[in-house]
Every structure is written in C-alpha cells, then in structure tokens.
Amino acid sequence: AQSVTQPDIHITVSEGASLELRCNYSYGATPYLFWYVQSPGQGLQLLLKYFSGDTLVQGIKGFEAEFKRSQSSFNLRKPSVHWSDAAEYFCAVVPPSGTASKLTFGTGTRLQVTL
Amino acid sequence: GAGVSQSPSNKVTEKGKDVELRCDPISGHTALYWYRQSLGQGLEFLIYFQGNSAPDKSGLPSDRFSAERTGGSVSTLTIQRTQQEDSAVYLCASSRPHYNEQFFGPGTRLTVL
C-alpha cells in the first residue's frame, strides 16, 4: 500500500532562516506529489504539485520542492521564512493516472517561527 | 470564483444523535471528496464521488457513516448514532474532471459530547 512519511512532527525556525520539510513516499510507481498548508482553524491550501518533468517545482508563497526519484523524496523548501508561515504542512500523494483519485497524506509537520 | 463551502462550520451534538454535514463544491468540479482529520488518526480519506460513477466508499469507518451527492453537486455526509470517537474536523474537497488538484473547504468541526 502507498504511504507517505513526514519524519519531523514539529520544527522551529527563526524568522529569516531557511526551511526544509522532509517527505518520503512508498509507492510502486512514481505518484503525483503535493504539499498542502493548513493554518489554524483553516482548510488545506495547495502550495505546489509535481506530476512529471522538471524536478524542481515552484509554488505559492515563495515555496519550492524538489522531487528526487532515487530517494523517493519530495522535500519542501523556503529560503527565508516569515512569521506568517507558521502552520501545519502536509505532504500527499495520489496514483499517477488521468482520473481523479483520493489523496494519501503524511502525518504533517507543524512549523513554529520565532521572531 | 467561489471556493468549496461547508456547513455548519461547527457542530456540537450529543452521543447517539444523527448529524448531517454539507459540502458545496466549486462549480464545474465533478469529483468530490470527504476526509476526516482527527488528533489520533491524522487526515483520512472517507469517500469520493466522480461524476455519475458509483462512489468509492472504501474509507468509511463504519456503516453509521453515509454520504450522498445530489444532482452532481452538493454532497451531504451523514453520521448516525454519533459516538465520541467521531469528534473530528470533516473536510470536503473537489476537483475538475481528470485532474488531481483538489481544492479544500474550511471544514466542519464536529464535537460529540
């Protein structure tokens, strides 16, 4: 069965510092990959997605992610974190197909930003 | 345009009561999903509807849970005889046909006393 692992439950960074959130997946074929962000009391907002092609993907709010097939990873990065980035971040996958399919989520990483 | 909307935003009920949660997807999105987010279980898939196809109910945790989608648009998730372990945030999402980018609503927080 497919699975998504986010090894870091909680990360604290200083405002202005760089950020990397880890995501590893286990799946027979390379799935479609997503990062979502959830602010307190809010729904999920899509930050970026990878289906194929260029392995470095740019998203909203200055985030980017790099797909590494050899490591089955899709880590999320931001060069300079802002206090408003404090939230919970979820990595998710779906099977690579042309039809809609359910997301399988990681357990999430809670980001705290110190001023 | 308008995003996915869900109602109510909060629901408090007593154990044993039935509840209905509503989701209004983005216009033109034929795929609609329900997920549950709870402290112990994280984000779990419940059910999804794709056009006129039979829904995928593989994530429903028990037969107390059911969902319907009327006219290919609005969906209602019903939980019968609620239990305290049903307390969670219920999230709805929708997507365009043949497209995997899902847009989420703000969720309904259900508390079962």
Image: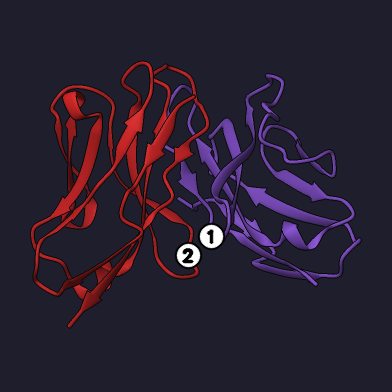
Chain colours: A red, B purple
Residue drawn at the location 17% of the way across and 22% of the way down: A53
Q: How many marks?
A: 2
> Relative to residue B16, is residue B40 drawn left or right?
left
Instruction: Pick whichever, B31 or B113, lies toward us.
Output: B113
Placement of B46 over or under B39, stated as above or below: above
- Residue under label 2, please give it: A42
Tell me residue A101's x, y (percent): 51, 27
Instruction: Pick whichever, B109 or B29, lies toward us.
Output: B109
- Chain of the residue on which disc 2 is drawn: A
Placement of A62 over or under A34, stated as above or below: below
- Chain of the residue on which disc 1 is drawn: B
Residue drawn at the location 54% of the way across and 51% of the way down: B4
Q: Please, what secondary structure does the residue beneath circle 2 have?
A: loop
Identify residue type, mark 1: Pro
> Relative to residue A97, is residue A86 drawn left or right?
left
Tell me residue B56's x, y (percent): 67, 26
Instruction: Pick whichever, A23 or A89, lies toward us.
Output: A23
Identify residue type, mark 2: Gln
Examine the image and state in which quarter residue B8 appears: bottom right
Name the outermost residue toward the bottom: A115
Placement of A20 over or under B93, stated as above or below: below
**Mark drawn on residue B106:** 1
Question: Dots 1 and 2: beta carbons under 8 Å?
Answer: yes
Tell me residue B89's x, y (percent): 61, 59
Residue drawn at the location 59% of the way across and 36% of the way down: B32
Examine the image and state in which quarter residue A96 appears: top left
Q: CA distance from mark 1 to mark 2?
A: 5 Å
- Mark 1 crowd level (few <14, some 14–19, many ≥20, 10 Å Cα): many
Instruction: Pick whichever, A81 or A99, lies toward us.
Output: A81
Residue drawn at the location 81% of the way across and 50% of the way down: B79
Q: Please, what secondary structure does the residue beneath circle 1 have?
A: loop
